[in-house]
Amino acid sequence: MTAIVHDARASAVRARRVRIGRDQWVGLLYVAPALAFVGVFFILPLGMTGWMSLNDWPLMGTHRFIGLDNYVAILKDLRFWNALRFTAWYTLVVTLAIFAVAFPLALHVERPRPLNGLYRTAYFLPVVVGFASASLLWSWLLNVDAGLFSPAAATLGLTAKKVNLLATFDLAFWSIIVMVVWKVAGFTMVILMTGLQSIPAELQEAARLDGAGAFARLRLITLPLIRRTIALALILSVTGSVLAFDQFYIILRGGPRNQTLTAVYWIFNQSFVSFKLGYGAALSMVLLVILVVLSLVQLRLLRNPEGL
C-alpha cells in the first residue's frame, strides 16, 4: 500500500513538472513577439551604437577602431557640457511648470462635476498634436510680424511696439516653456488623475469627518497614496525634457547665439551636420547613462518616504 501511494505521489509530481514546463513554453511563445521587437529595435541598435562609439566612423569611407578616444574627446567638449547644463536647467524648470499646471487640472477633472468630460477633452487635446506640428504652430504664433502674440499685444496696447519673443534668451526660453506646458500638461494630468481616482473615497470622507482640512488631506492622504503615480509622471517628464529637440530645432535653431542648444541638439549636430557618427554615438551613450541614473534616483526617492 505504501509503495502504491509513493508511486501515485511520484506520478503526480512528474505530471505537475510536465504541466509547468509546458506552461512556461506557452508563456514564452506568447511573449516571443515582444522579445523579438525589443531585441530588433532596442538591444541590437544599442549594441551597434556602443560599437560605433568606439570607432572613428565617418559618413563615407571605412570606420577605424579608436577605443575610448571619443569618450576622452567628450571631456574636452565645452559645447556639449554647456548644452548639458542648459538641458538640466530646462528640465528642472519645465518639469516644475508641468506639474504646477497638471496637478490642479487633475484635481479639477477628477471630482464629479457637470461637463467633466468636456473639460478633460479640452485639457488633453494639445497632447494629440505631434511635437513637430506643435513647434511649427508656435513658430508662427511667436513670429514678430506674421504671428499672433506680438502683433496682438501691440494692438491691445500691452506693449509699445511689436516685441520679438525669440530675440533674447529669456523671452525665447520662457516662450518654449509655455509651449511645452501647453502641449504636455494634459498628458501628465491624465496620469495624475488615474492615481487620484484609485484613492478610496472612504479615506477622504473619514479624514473630512475627523476635521482634516483640504491641505491636511492632500499632504497626509493624497500625496502618499499616489507616490508611485507621481514617480511615473516625473520619470516620463524628466526623460522627455532631457531628450528635448523638436521645439528648439524648429522654433529657435539653437538661438539666440547658440544659447538654447540642448544635449540632443548637439548630438544631432555632431552626427548629421558634422557627420562624426562615432562621436555622436559616444555622446548618445553618455546621455543614456545620465538618463538611467536620473531614473534610478527618482525611483529610489519616491519609493522611500524617508528619502524625500
Image: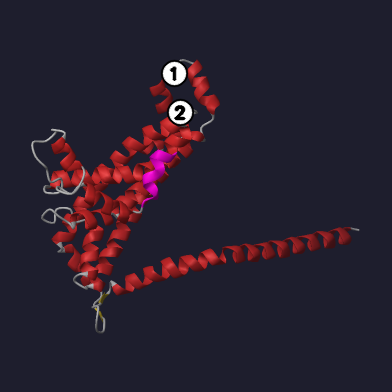
Mark 2 element type = helix
Q: Residues within 10 Å of mark 2 (few under 14, many from 20)?
A: some
Residue 189 visible from this viewpoint: no
Q: Which amino acid, by three-letter code, is at mark 2?
A: Ile
Percent position of residue 99, x then y: 34, 38
Expressed as whole percent of the image width and height from the top left, the position of residue 284 reads 29, 64
Q: Which residue is mark 1?
A: 212
Image quadrant where one finds the C terminus = top left
Task: Look at the numbered discs 1 and 2 and tell me whether their residues touch, using CB distance below 8 Å.
Answer: yes
- What secondary structure predominates along the stretch shown in magenta? helix
Q: Look at label 1 and name its amino acid.
A: Ala
Q: Nearer the viewer, residue 181 or 293?
A: 181
- Element at badge 1? loop
Magenta residues, as a range? 121-129
Q: Is residue 212 magenta?
A: no
> What residue do we see at 45% from left, 28% from top?
221
Q: Which mark, residue 271?
A: none
The part of the image, by quadrant, that contains residue 277 is: bottom left
Circle number at residue 221: 2
Query: Which x, y percent locates residue 287?
Result: 28, 59
Type of colouring: secondary structure
> Looking at the picture, does residue 181 appear above or below residue 274?
above
Residue at image x 41%, y 19%? 213
